[in-house]
Amino acid sequence: MKMRCLSCHKLSILSFCNRCQTKLLQPTVSKRQVGSLDVYSFFKYQNIENLLLTKHTAQGFIVYKALAQITFRPFIKRFLKEDRRLVYVIGVDETVKYGYSHVALLTHALRAKQSKILHAKLLAENQISYAGKSLEYRKQNPRAFKYTGLKDIEAILVDDIITTGTTLQEAKNVLESNGLKVLFSLTLADANR
């Protein structure tokens, strides 16, 4: 079944046609250190900002699912080819909004034989929005994560965007206090890149 490419609006069997994927959505993996956490991102925030903001709409379901297939899916295939251990994948606050969880769509793309998804096991008890807020504000209003998953495992932490890194650092600390070893974190975009 053909639909329209979300970018150029030409007929395509994919959410983003091959031309747009090649020309506009070619991921470039970058690494950023946040405390002791390595964070890998696929895009500069400003390059895909309009796509990322669809998470506040029903259309975001299609957009995030497509972005996850373009970025997270190939990444996990390469990672597991080189590293044969079993890893778990944990999304940062997979709370459902607008009928879906955009972070859950990202974590789901990392499902493989050697990677197990632990959906909705790391949820924020403080649902405050950090959009446009300062680092000081973020530090004064932590997300208060609660983890209810498996203990003593190795995990990959997933979020959509890294801005200051406070959310990912807080999430990592909560996971480690529950006996988990966080290998690294994956995000679609880095706002400071």
Image (tube, rainbow, N blue to C red):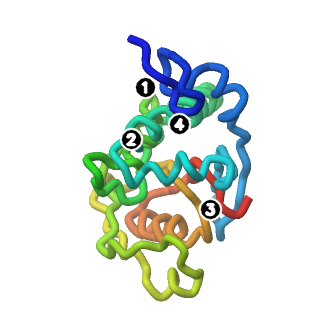
* Circle 1 SS class: loop
Residue 16, relative to residue 128: is it above or below?
above
| Dot 1 or dot 2, earlier in sequence | 2
| Residue on which disc 3 sits | 37
In the image, which is nearer the foreground, mark 2 or mark 4? 2
Q: Quadrant of residue 16?
A: top right
In the image, which is nearer the foreground, mark 1 or mark 2? 2
Q: Residue 113, labelled with which disc?
A: 1
Distance between the Cα atoms at labels 2 and 4? 13 Å
| Dot 3 or dot 1, earlier in sequence | 3
| Residue on which disc 2 sits | 59
In the image, which is nearer the foreground, mark 2 or mark 3? 2
Distance between the Cα atoms at labels 4 and 1? 21 Å
* Residue 42 x %, y %: 65, 44
Tag 3: residue type?
A: Leu
Tag 2: residue type?
A: Gln
For the point 47% across and 49% down, the residue is 155
Residue 63, relative to residue 158: is it above or below?
above
Q: Nearer the viewer, residue 57 or 111?
A: 57
For the point 65% across and 29% down, the residue is 82
- Residue 59 seen by the camera: yes
Quadrant containing the N terminus is top left
